[in-house]
Image (cartoon, grey):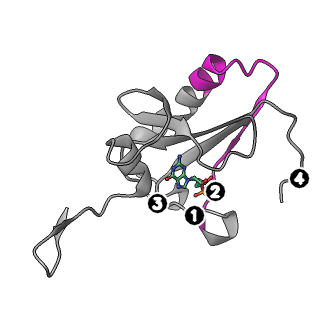
Amino acid sequence: MTRSGFGQTRSMSTVFSKIVNREIPGTIVYEDEHVVAFKDIVPFAPVHIIIVTRQEIPGIASLPETGDHLHLLNAAKTIAEQQGLTNGYRLVINQGEDGGQTVDHLHIHLLGGRPMAWPPG
Ligand code: 5GP
């Protein structure tokens, strides 16, 4: 939190941290000590879940040596099983402008429930 020129407190956290901290609504489907997962607001597949680190890591390009990101893949596997994605699924991490990243808070997209095309756009 920082203090603006008008004496109001202003949160500097990402939109994903606001969901994690229940400051804004989100359909949370999984959480543990390291990550939180919720439904994407604009789903591109029958199952489209965002798995985000509790730690505010901006993205793959600025990974610390250790931290919550080390738990993302295990969480993705657990959530995929919970979602019943027995026929397969896709995990996506977008990095930077060319990668199509729009929220600077490290996250994996878990997409499933339909066949995925390749190559991606
Ligand atoms: P990126 O483009 O950074 O890889 O992915 C960001 C994703 O977050 C997008 O798929 C977008 O639909 C989703 N998103 C952005 N804002 C919100 C929000 O407020 N709530 C939820 N549930 N998803 C969001």
> What x and y, as percent, mark residue 42?
65, 50
Circle 3/circle 4 CB separation < 8 Å = no
Q: Which residue is mark 3?
A: 62
Q: Amino acid at mark 3?
A: Ser
Q: Which residue is mark 2?
A: 94
Secondary structure found at label 1: loop
* Chain-order first, disc 1 or disc 2: 2
Q: Quadrant of the C terminus?
A: bottom right
Q: Magenta segment, which residues?
A: 77-96
Secondary structure found at label 2: loop
View extreme (front): residue: 25
> CA gap, disc 3 to disc 2?
13 Å
Q: Is residue 106 left or right of residue 82?
A: left
Is residue 9 highlighted in magenta?
no
Instruction: Give the label, 3 or 2, closer to the camera.
Output: 2
Secondary structure found at label 4: loop
Tell me the number on the disc at residue 119.
4
For the point 42% across and 43% down, which residue is it? 25
Mark 1 CB in 8 Å range of ligand 1?
Answer: yes
Mark 2 CB in 8 Å range of ligand 1?
Answer: yes
Q: Residue 101 is drawn in which quadrant?
A: bottom right
Circle 1/circle 2 CB separation < 8 Å = yes
For the point 43% across and 35% down, which residue is it? 35
Nearer-the-camera pick, 47 or 77: 47
For the point 85% across and 40% down, which residue is it? 116
Judge whether 90 appears above or below 56 on screen.
above
Q: Amino acid at mark 2?
A: Asn
Is residue 86 highlighted in magenta?
yes
* Chain-order first, disc 3 or disc 2: 3
